[in-house]
Image (cartoon, rainbow, N blue to C red):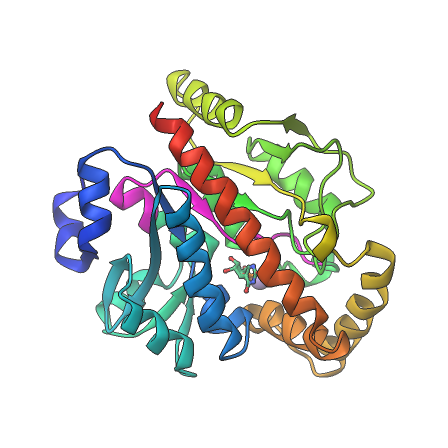
Amino acid sequence: MIPHRAQAFIDIAAPVARALADKKPVVALESTIITHGMPYPQNAEMAANVETIVAAEGAVPATIAVIDGRLKIGLSDEERTALAKTGAAMKLSRADLAFAVSQRRTGGTTVAATMIGAALAGIEVFATGGIGGVHKGAETSFDISADLDELARTPVIVVSAGAKAILDIDKTLEVLESRGVPVVAYGSDTMPAFWSRRSPHAAPLRLDTPEAIAGFFETRGALGLGGGMLVANPVPTEHEIPADEMAGFIAAAQADAEAEAVSGKAVTPFLLARILELTGGRSLATNIALVENNARLAARIAAARGS
Ligand code: PSU
Ligand code: MN
């Protein structure tokens, strides 16, 4: 399954390898959310819970990360906990994934890098929190996440709660459309906005069942269209922070980022951490709830792929 030259750098955990060989459902999970998206110990708890949720749905979880230069497809409990504790992990995307491998480094994989790992291993479904996208002010900063290009080229279904509301959602949708990436809202006519169930933006496409999403992906493949797709799954009502409440916190965090001249890879982690402080931890509880919700849907889509 794994291309011959890549094999020397990749470790597939035994339960994941077995499930792939038996054509059982597998769900990839990212690790930048562990190393850069949440503080310890909540990140460790979240990462463990999400794996439990995937397993409870009858799928095998495969958290992807680079540990001491090995591209790991599936982590042991010890590896996952150590990754959550280390403050020294890199944040890895397409540009630096192979750097970390060749230099024997450790890093969390972003949505883009996790898609690359998943595709190498033959995993088609991946759950995250929110993808990276076009940042507010991108017309001057040029800050557009590599996640968007990865969605255009790598054939993986990415289940998210939409684009993080710290982004310019309109511009993010425009880029995805230009790159030919389908954006499917799950059971909703509007795009969710990460911490909030609704944004002012209409959903480009809507589907209401895991089977329909799996069928759409199958059809794209059959027609030779290639590339991935983005599923936007609204956070459950009881955990959401309405968009009008979030707007003030987001604006304040953005102003702080500008005042401190934060740029590049540091922007997303900075904003998430600042919003956590400003909301007194409420944004973190919502973030955890939406990741869990996405893991559940991803497991059901993975199960539907096999049927
Ligand atoms: N979703 C979260 N928390 C995160 C991220 C997503 O709930 O920390 C990470 C993902 O790994 C995503 C990355 O790929 O942020 C985007 O970073 P950037 O904007 O620098 O491309
Ligand atoms: Mn960026």
Left-right relation of 9 to 90: left
In the image, 10: left or right of 214? Answer: left
Where does the image place residue 24, in percent across and percent down from the top left? Answer: 27, 36
- The answer to whether 211 is drawn above or below residue 24 in the figure is above
Q: Quadrant of the C terminus?
A: top left
Q: Which of the pair 102/114 is nearer the observer?
A: 114
The quarter of the displayed image where residue 20 is located: top left
Residue occupying the point 34% across, 27% down: 306
Depicted 253 relative to depicted 286: above or below: below
Ligand 1 falls in quadrant: bottom right
Nearer to the camera, 189 or 88: 189
Does any portion of residue 290 appear in the rendered image? yes
Q: Which segment did they paint magenta?
A: 117-135
Instruction: Pinpoint residue 21: horizontal percent, then vertical percent.
Output: 17, 37
**Picture layout, residue 72 above or below residue 112:** below
Q: Is residue 110 magenta?
A: no
Give the position of the N terminus as an image quadrant: top left
Q: Residue at x 61, y 34 (%)?
A: 183
Q: How many marks?
A: 0
Which residue is drawn at the image coordinates 21% and 51% (left, top)?
A: 15
Q: Determine the residue located farthest toward the front in the rendered image.
A: 56
Q: Is 225 located above or below residue 11 in the figure? A: above
Q: Position of residue 221 (x, y in %)?
A: 39, 23
Give residue 53's position: percent from left, percent from top.
45, 52
Please indicate whether residue 86 sits to the left or right of residue 74 in the image.
right
Q: Residue at x 41, y 75 (%)?
A: 84
Where on the picture, by quarter, is residue 299? top left
Is residue 132 at least partly visible in the picture? no
